[in-house]
Image (cartoon, rainbow, N blue to C red):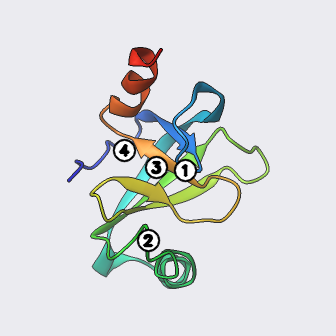
Amino acid sequence: MKDLPMIGKTYNCFDDGKITEGRRYEVTITDIIPFDKADEKTLKLWTDEGLTSDWLFDNTDYFIKADSTECKEEPYCTFARTKDGGWFSLGYYWNSGRLDIDGSLLSSLTTQD
């Protein structure tokens, strides 16, 4: 299971979970919210977009809030824990991506040829 990110730190994220340089953007963590402390808006997002994506999510222990560089018009995103213990954002279009907390996804790009 991946660790929690650090508030204020900027991480790489990969659009739609596709690990390529062209799909890489950055997010800066703004808040980490335990599931039982989440507001109604976040829980609705989880119900509407997380729980309906049963191939990706099962349950989550935290929600990670972040500001994203992917889309200036919609810079906010919310991540939930995936079945494999990583983090993926809730959303169907902008800011829907896999968070790279430990740098392993970016590292995999440099080892591919």
Residues under numbered marks 3 and 1 in contact, where contact means CB atoms less than 8 Å apart: no
Drawn side of residue 76 relative to residue 27, left or right: right
Q: Of the residues under marks 4 and 2, which one precedes in the sequence?
A: 4
Mark sitting on residue 7 = 4
Q: Is residue 34 above or below residue 89?
A: below
Residue named by callout 3: 30
Q: Of the residues under marks 1 and 2, which one precedes in the sequence?
A: 2
x 57%, y 46%: residue: 67
User: Marks 1 and 4, how far apart in space?
Assistant: 18 Å
Residue named by callout 2: 55
How far across and how far down the image is residue 82, in percent? 36, 62
In the image, what residue type sits under mark 1? Gly
In the image, what residue type sits under mark 2? Trp
Please rate how many residues cluster around mark 2, counting C-alpha atoms within 10 Å: few if below 14, some from 14 to 19, many from 20: few
Please rate how many residues cluster around mark 1, counting C-alpha atoms within 10 Å: few if below 14, some from 14 to 19, many from 20: many
How far across and how far down the image is residue 44, in percent? 54, 84
Q: Which of pointers 3 and 1 indicates the residue nearer the eye?
A: 1
In the image, what residue type sits under mark 4? Ile
Q: Which of pointers 1 and 4 indicates the residue nearer the eye?
A: 1
Check disc 1 and report its element: helix, strand or loop.
strand
Mark sitting on residue 64 = none
Q: In which quarter of the image is residue 18?
A: top right
Please rate how many residues cluster around mark 3, counting C-alpha atoms within 10 Å: few if below 14, some from 14 to 19, many from 20: some
How far across and how far down the image is residue 53, in percent? 50, 75
Q: Is residue 79 above or below residue 97?
A: below
Q: Which of pointers 4 and 2 indicates the residue nearer the eye?
A: 2
x 38%, y 54%: residue: 87
User: Marks 4 and 2, how far apart in space?
Assistant: 28 Å
x 46%, y 33%: residue: 10
User: Marks 3 and 1, how far apart in space?
Assistant: 16 Å
Which of 82/79 is in front? 82
